[in-house]
Image (tube, helix red, strand yellow):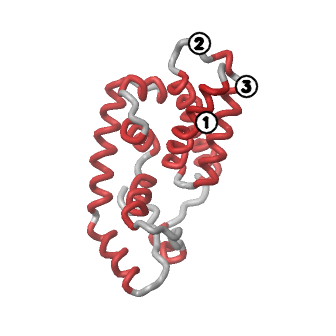
Amino acid sequence: MSQDLILAQIPALRRYARALTGDTWAADDLVQDTLERACSKWRLWLVGSNLRAWLFSVMHNLFLNKLRKTHWQTSLTQVDFDAVAGQLPAPASGSDQLLDLQRCLLQLPPEQREVLLLVSLEDMSYAEVAKVTGVAIGTVMSRLSRARTRLQVLLDAPSLKAQDAAVQSTNTPRVVPLQRLK
């Protein structure tokens, strides 16, 4: 496997990892784990096949494994995010629209968020996304449709916009509601 071929994929891997995790540090860790796994399992990549899709598959599987592990570890504790929302200041951002989009993306179920990001952000075909995620093309299309619909609902939610406007008008730190519509 040529180093140059892998290096060319790092920006796309980082972009996808940041969108998946919503956190720069976690994204960088995910990219590093992906590259380490790819280097240790390079024999599994078939020369002539789509290296980009293979790397995204490796990242997808690592991300799901981390989600499962985190879910298992936190399944014993449930937190009412609406009750503690005032204690969760949003990160400083120059663009409220980007913050709203990121907040809404992170509220999508992981399988919908992955498909939406791979199709729209990484410009992958449905077949490539199906290969990366290990599901049928019809499932990819269904998840994409549900993700787009849910994202539109989240972005248009009047209660969230009203809350954001009220918070901004009081000059207090913005609050990111972690779970609003489920």
Which residue, given by chain and number where applicable, does mark 1 sit on?
Answer: 62
Cα separation, mark 3 vs mark 2, equals: 16 Å
Residue 41, by quadrant, is: top right
Residue 164 drawn above or below residue 63 = below
Report if the CB atoms under discs 1 and 2 are less than 8 Å apart: no
Q: Nearer the viewer, residue 80 or 160?
A: 160
Across and down, in percent, residue 143 comes to 35, 37
Which residue, given by chain and number where applicable, does mark 2 sit on?
Answer: 47
Quarter of the image with the C terminus is bottom left
Question: In this image, 3 relative to 159: left or right?
Answer: right
Q: Residue at x 73, y 25 (%)?
A: 40
Q: Residue at x 46, y 23 (%)?
A: 131
Q: Residue at x 45, y 40 (%)?
A: 114
Quarter of the image with the N terminus is top right
Helix, strand or loop at label 3? It is helix
Query: Along the polypeptide, which appears first: circle 1 or circle 2?
Result: 2
Q: Residue at x 54, y 76 (%)?
A: 87
Crowd rating for badge 2 (residues with CA inside 10 Å; few <14, some 14–19, many 20+)? few
Which residue, given by chain and number where applicable, does mark 3 sit on?
Answer: 40
Q: Nearer the viewer, mark 1 or mark 3?
A: 3
Residue 173 drawn above or below residue 104 = below
Across and down, in percent, residue 73 comes to 65, 50
Cα separation, mark 1 vs mark 2, equals: 22 Å
